[in-house]
Image: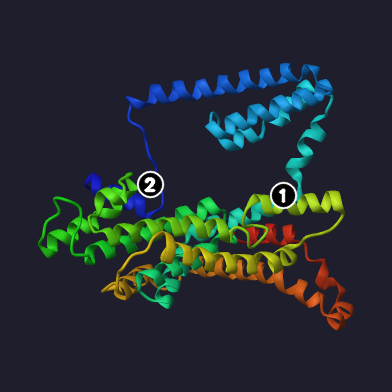
Amino acid sequence: MSSKSEDRIVREQGAYDYEPDDRDKPRAVGRVWLYRVLGLVLAGAVYLLLGGAELSADGRIVAAVATLMAVWWMTEALPLSATALLPIVAFPAFTEGTIDEATLPYADPIVFLFLGGFLIAIAMQKWNLHRRIALLTLRRVGTHPRRIILGMMISTAFLSMWVSNTATTLMMLPIAMSVLTLVVERSTTTAPGAASSTSAGRADAGDLGERLQAGGAVSDLVEDRDVRVFGVALVLSIAWSASIGGLGTLLGSPPNAIVAGYISSELDKTVGFLQWMMLGVPTVVVFLGIAWLLITRVLFRFHLDDVPGGRAMIDDQISDLGAMSQGEKMVLGVFSAAAFLWIVPGLLSNVAVLGDAAPWLGSFDDTVIAIAAGLVLFF
């Protein structure tokens, strides 16, 4: 099998990771150690600089550890998850805190809520449910470039309400590359040096996604201005809509759940899944519309007609997915059941008659639902 074919297979499976060659590895290792030492030095500096402040020794250590973690997170001197475990070691070792106190936040219900959400997200990606949702949405909205961007934004925002923004973006980019490749294939000009014959032009366009995944810029690979602008708009629309969609639910983005947890602990008020969605979903709808208008009408204006063969391409990709597999049906069923339990019982409990007759409707715990959904996926 050629290396090009292997790269294409890896990309289609969503695991297109960069592997530095042997010449880059010593330099990368040296940089990582530089960041690790930098974090330790800055942490020590913070501890010393706070010596004159009205802070206890424990307070200064907490500030130093926070500085160390911030540097290591920003530079990825250690894996992000490994850095997150640092307080479990540092606080019992250097402060008067106990191991029980240090580990208590790691058992917060918010953590398990996200654990359940991550399990659902991994299952969606494994069985390509996200791809089917996106393609069906694109087929529904049509093949005009502006409508394609709208369809990508709707799909991305919806997925981002349940999956992390970063994971959603990574899942949607290969679909965007397929759409962009088709637009380039149908355009009259491609990058300099492209063959003018139809077959050669299509071969060059078919290779566009691979070159973009390898780090090529749209502006370098495409000569037609409108196609270039459309490509930039398409990619940015995914990033924007992933961030916007993350506002919709507690699972959409970690800050949402952190704020809900803070309100619960400090203000003694519960912000459940339904309560958050009542504010979050309208916010997503409004800002998604604003973002679409800004991208397509103000910031990145282009003049392209319906993409010839666009619907056929979408139909072909849906056909390639085949009928829904047993695993895909399972994930869809579990996801739908979890969403139902997160939303509907809370709505029904607000109805006076039903709330009085069935008080248990208001007792569904969001974290329990998330973990239960995650566990069912292992069956």
* Picture layout, residue 105 above or below residue 210: above
Residue found 54% across the figure and 28% down from its top: 77
Q: Label 2 near label 1: C-beta < 8 Å?
A: no
- The residue wearing badge 2 is 16
Identify the amino acid type marked 2.
Answer: Tyr
Question: Most extreme residue toward the front, as rendered?
Answer: 298
Q: How many marks?
A: 2
The residue beneath circle 1 is: 258
Between residues 37 and 21, which one lies in front from this camera angle?
37
Q: Position of residue 310 (x, y in %)?
A: 31, 72
Specify few, some or many for label 1: CA neighbours under 10 Å numbering under 14, 14-19, or 20 or more: some
Looking at the image, residue 103 sits to the left or right of residue 231; the answer is: right
- Give the x, y percent position of residue 289: 53, 68
Q: Is residue 41 positioned above or below 226 on the image?
A: above
Image quadrant in which you'd find residue 80: top right
**Residue 98 lies in quadrant:** top right
For image coordinates 38% across by 68% down, the residue present is 321
Secondary structure of residue under mark 2? loop
